[in-house]
Amino acid sequence: MEKSEFIYYFSKLYFGEAVKETILIENWEEGDFDIRYIEYAHVFEEIKKECLKGKNEKEILNFLTKNKINLVKAFNEKMSQYFLEQLNQYPIKASSAQEIINNNIPLGDSINPELLRIFRELEERVSN
């Protein structure tokens, strides 16, 4: 695999989800995650070293896809926990809060950039 192809696949399969993750968590926590942007270059270099040392294209794509899946899964778990904690502030049972999240929040195989807007609309309905 050429280095230019690797950059394309890295960006398509991993980096786009990592950027969405950082932006959504920044907006949720209202924190300063500038350090994560610096880490992107380090992550890129580490993954590039791993991928370009004698692996074929299929192995590289599988590696990047697996990393993307793990990133999305960790993000979805983190956001589900945030959402659950938020909904538990209202007078509803914990099991009901989890059911509400499962039925109304689209946590799929990629990070939905509309996730916070969707949750805030849901939260508004629950609070009323």
Image (cartoon, helix red, strand yellow):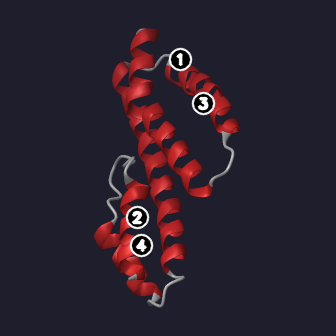
- Crowd class of label 4 (few under 14; some 14 to 19; many from 20; radius 10 Å): some
Residue 11: horizontal and vertical position, in percent?
A: 43, 26
Q: Are marks 2 and 3 in contact (CB under 8 Å)?
A: no
Q: How far is the residue under mark 3 from the one under mark 4?
A: 32 Å
Disc number lying in front (1 or 3): 3
Q: Which residue is mark 3?
A: 40
Q: Which residue is mark 4?
A: 123
Instruction: Please give the name of the residue rendered at 54% of the width and 21% of the height, measured from the top-left corner.
Output: 48
Q: Which residue is mark 2?
A: 119
Labels 4 and 1: the sequence-earlier one? 1
Q: How far is the residue under mark 1 from the one under mark 2?
A: 42 Å
Amino acid on which disc 1 is placed: Lys
Instruction: Please give the name of the residue rendered at 66% of the width and 43% of the height, measured from the top-left corner.
Output: 33
Residue 66 falls left or right of residue 39: left
Q: How far is the residue under mark 4 from the one under mark 1?
A: 48 Å
Amino acid on which disc 3 is placed: Tyr
Labels 1 and 3: the sequence-earlier one? 3
- Crowd class of label 3 (few under 14; some 14 to 19; many from 20; radius 10 Å): some
Residue 110: horizontal and vertical position, in percent?
A: 36, 46
Q: As rendered, which of 101 and 60 lies closer to the eye?
A: 101
Residue 88: horizontal and vertical position, in percent?
A: 51, 82
- Crowd class of label 1 (few under 14; some 14 to 19; many from 20; radius 10 Å): few
Disc number lying in front (2 or 3): 2
Labels 2 and 3: the sequence-earlier one? 3
Q: How far is the residue under mark 2 from the one under mark 3?
A: 27 Å
Picture quadrant of residue 56: top left
Q: Are marks 2 and 4 in contact (CB under 8 Å)?
A: yes
